[in-house]
């Protein structure tokens, strides 16, 4: 599985901490981490939490990534921005219990974490424990197990609801503020990571045209 990491500007100083924690756990399960930035507070390409959502939408809808890990100061803004995108189902994960329940009940494809609120002593251990609860079990298995069937049914209903309430990703890309879109894909490693992994030619072509 390709796991994409996106860090916004207010928390860019913690990029290495988050990346190291995610990579340590993802590698245990045979997953590959693609770090789309930010890498430091001084990066030329500055990502806001709104751009996090747009970038998550691009990566998941193009299948350049199978799962996105993002966040911001509280995790709320990035979660809201991600859930505004078609095909993105993002949960707010603060502790390992959140991670486990989100994986088992909601089986989402994106998680947002707080990297300022509550980020104190041993924060990197909490990060690792959260990522482990996401990756160590089969998503959507249900909790409690006897409710697995109804949970799967509700996920399908939610997916259908989102499909009719959102534009497709290509339409979003063509109609969103183009300066915002250019800024979201301006990271120094975006082209290196995205274009070889994208499986949607129309999205690829449109982004290349920018």
Image (cartoon, rainbow, N blue to C red):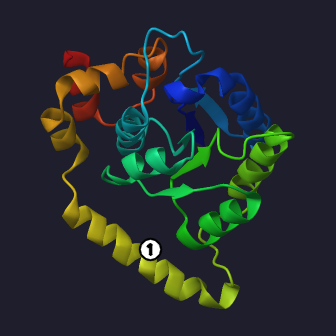
Of 185 and 2, which appears nearest the observer?
A: 185
Identity of the residue drawn at 59% across and 29% down: 11
> x%, y% of residue 85?
32, 49
Q: Is residue 104 visible?
A: yes
Q: Is residue 205 visible?
A: no
Up-down relation of residue 16 to residue 69 (above or below): above
Q: Is the residue marked by circle 1 packed among few (<14), some (14-19), or many (20+) residues within 10 Å?
A: some
Of 51 and 109, which appears nearest the observer?
A: 51
Of 126 and 116, which appears nearest the observer?
A: 116
The residue where tag 1 is placed is 155
Q: Is residue 68 left or right of residue 33?
A: left
Q: Is residue 151 left or right of residue 18?
A: left
Number of callouts: 1
Quarter in which the N terminus is drawn:
top right
Identity of the residue drawn at 69% across and 84% down: 144
The local secondary structure at tag 1 comes to: helix
Q: Residue furthest left?
A: 175
* Residue 162 placement: quadrant: bottom left
* Residue 4 placement: quadrant: top right
> x%, y% of residue 56?
42, 40
Identity of the residue drawn at 42% across and 43% down: 60
Quarter in which the C terminus is drawn:
top left
Up-down relation of residue 78 to residue 35 (above or below): below
Q: Is residue 165 left or right of residue 139?
A: left
> x%, y% of residue 163?
25, 63
Identity of the residue drawn at 36% across and 42% down: 57
Of 209 and 124, which appears nearest the observer?
A: 124
């Amino acid at each position: 599985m390709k796991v994409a990491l996106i860090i916004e500007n207010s928390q860019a100083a913690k990029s290495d901490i988050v990346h190291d924690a995610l990579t340590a756990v993802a590698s245990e399960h045979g997953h590959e981490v693609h770090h789309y930035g930010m890498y430091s507070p001084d990066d030329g390409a500055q990502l806001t939490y709104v751009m996090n959502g747009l970038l998550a939408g691009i990566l998941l809808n193009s299948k350049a990534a199978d799962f996105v890990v993002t966040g911001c100061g509280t995790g709320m803004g990035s979660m809201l921005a991600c859930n505004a995108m078609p095909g993105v189902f993002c949960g707010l994960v603060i502790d390992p219990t959140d991670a486990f329940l989100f994986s088992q009940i909601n089986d989402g494809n994106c998680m947002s974490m707080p990297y300022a609120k509550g980020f104190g002593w041993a924060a990197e251990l909490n990060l690792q424990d959260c990522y482990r609860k996401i990756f160590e079990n089969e998503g959507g298995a249900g909790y409690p197990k006897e409710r697995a069937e109804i949970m799967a049914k509700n996920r399908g209903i939610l997916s259908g609801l989102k499909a009719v309430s959102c534009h497709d990703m290509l339409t979003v890309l063509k109609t969103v503020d183009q300066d915002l879109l250019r800024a979201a894909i301006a990271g120094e490693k975006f082209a290196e990571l995205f274009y070889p992994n994208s499986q949607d030619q129309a999205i690829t072509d449109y982004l290349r045209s920018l």
